[in-house]
């Protein structure tokens, strides 16, 4: 800059959560059906703990990218979005169609997005939506994109054995497509992340990758069922109750807000028991930390956009509020931010 020249003001764009479209597969499974099939599972007690009565399941030949395609086409139709206007596709899944190529490239082609469009997969579970928002914020702030399609799609049911009492009543297949748009004022602030890979043995699919099975990470506790997916629920709960209150404190500090200034705490919808433990640990009630699992199930990375979509339809997310978005789970990985609609 030349001496005496006035400083140049640069208006940096920011990311905002735009419209969301959700897609569930057509096949459902209820707790009543499970009780008929497995009366020895004590389904009423399981349902009380999970808070889940209905889950959605893909057909054998139906993949996460099929769900993603349906969610995206629904979003485009409902919001009159031109596919050519999308600058970047961010696709979060842990059930990709193939080890390679990147599923985002397949979705880009299937949706008819322009060849100028960037596209990438990122493999994260329950923290994935917040990570995706952070990636979108970086792309928009740096001027690399203005309109981003953030897609979360998961089919954990394909990893679960029909006889698995611990996992089958919990996980549900779904996809959500979120339009991330460029705005002038910061809307996603106070991003905070956490990772502890020592927890990898508490939620894992130990086969299907390049690591030989003989050298794979072993489950933390005895594996009782034949599912490819293994979950150590008690260890995950312990990790969550310790890590998430600290995460929230750090987010609020970065955003210069108090807990009382937060309208809603939108948490990954894992199970009712886990969310009730968080309500107690954080010191909020169900009005401020909503639980919406009954007719959804745990849809992994899609729980937060599905929750946002539900609350928007109920008129509970007006402009001008401060809401926490927090995801946590497999990895161990956790992330959160403050969202200003």
Image (cartoon, grey):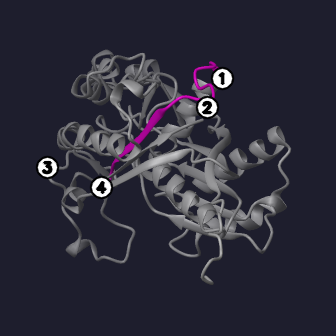
Residue position for label 4: 194
Residue position for label 2: 309
What element does badge 1 sit on? helix
Contact between marks 3 and 4 (CB within 8 A): the answer is no
**Real-space Cα distance between discs 4 and 1?**
31 Å
What element does badge 3 sit on? loop
What span is colored magenta in the figure? 313-331
User: In this rendering, would 96 be left or right of 52?
Assistant: right
The residue carrying pointer 4 sits among few (fewer than 14), some (14 to 19) or many (20 or more) residues within 10 Å by Cα, namely: some
Pick whichever, 192 or 77, lies toward us. Answer: 192
Q: Is residue 324 magenta?
A: yes
Disc with the residue nearer the chain's start (2 vs 3): 3
The answer, for residue 63, to whether it is visible in the render is no
Can you give x and y, in whole percent of width and height, for residue 157 in the image?
A: 46, 45
Disc with the residue nearer the chain's start (4 vs 2): 4
Q: Nearer the viewer, mark 3 or mark 4?
A: 4
Residue position for label 3: 222
Pick whichever, 340 or 19, lies toward us. Answer: 340
Contact between marks 1 and 2 (CB within 8 A): the answer is yes
Q: Nearer the viewer, mark 4 or mark 2?
A: 4
**Quarter of the figure with residue 58:** top right
């Amino acid at each position: 800059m030349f001496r005496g020249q006035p400083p140049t003001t640069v208006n940096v764009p920011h990311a905002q959560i735009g419209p969301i479209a959700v897609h569930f597969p057509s096949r459902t499974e209820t707790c009543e059906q499970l009780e008929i099939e497995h009366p020895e599972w004590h389904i009423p007690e399981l349902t009380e703990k999970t808070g889940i009565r209905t889950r959605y399941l893909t057909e054998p030949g139906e993949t996460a990218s099929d769900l993603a395609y349906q969610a995206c086409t629904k979003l485009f139709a409902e919001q009159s979005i031109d596919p050519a206007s999308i600058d970047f596709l961010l696709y979060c899944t842990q059930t990709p169609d193939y080890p390679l190529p990147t599923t985002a490239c397949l979705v880009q082609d299937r949706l008819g997005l322009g060849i100028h469009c960037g596209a990438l997969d990122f493999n994260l579970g329950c923290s994935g939506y917040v990570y995706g928002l952070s990636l979108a914020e970086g792309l928009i702030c740096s001027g690399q994109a203005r309109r981003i399609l953030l897609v979360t799609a998961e089919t954990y049911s394909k990893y679960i054995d029909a006889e698995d009492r611990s996992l089958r009543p919990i996980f549900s297949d779904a996809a959500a497509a979120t339009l991330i748009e460029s705005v002038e004022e910061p809307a996603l602030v106070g991003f905070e992340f956490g990772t502890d890979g020592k927890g990898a043995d508490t939620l894992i699919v130990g086969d299907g990758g390049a690591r030989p099975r003989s050298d794979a990470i072993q489950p933390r506790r005895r594996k009782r069922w034949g599912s490819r997916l293994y979950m150590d629920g008690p260890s995950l709960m312990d990790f969550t109750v310790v890590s998430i209150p600290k995460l929230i404190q750090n987010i609020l500090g970065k955003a210069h807000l108090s807990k009382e200034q937060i309208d809603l705490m939108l948490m990954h919808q894992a199970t009712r028991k886990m969310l009730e433990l968080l309500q107690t640990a954080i010191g909020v009630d169900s009005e401020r930390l909503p639980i919406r699992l009954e007719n959804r199930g745990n849809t992994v990375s899609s729980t937060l956009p599905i929750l946002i979509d539900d609350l928007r339809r109920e008129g509970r997310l007006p402009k001008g509020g401060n809401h926490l978005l927090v995801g946590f789970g497999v990895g161990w990985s956790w992330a959160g931010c403050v969202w200003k609609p």
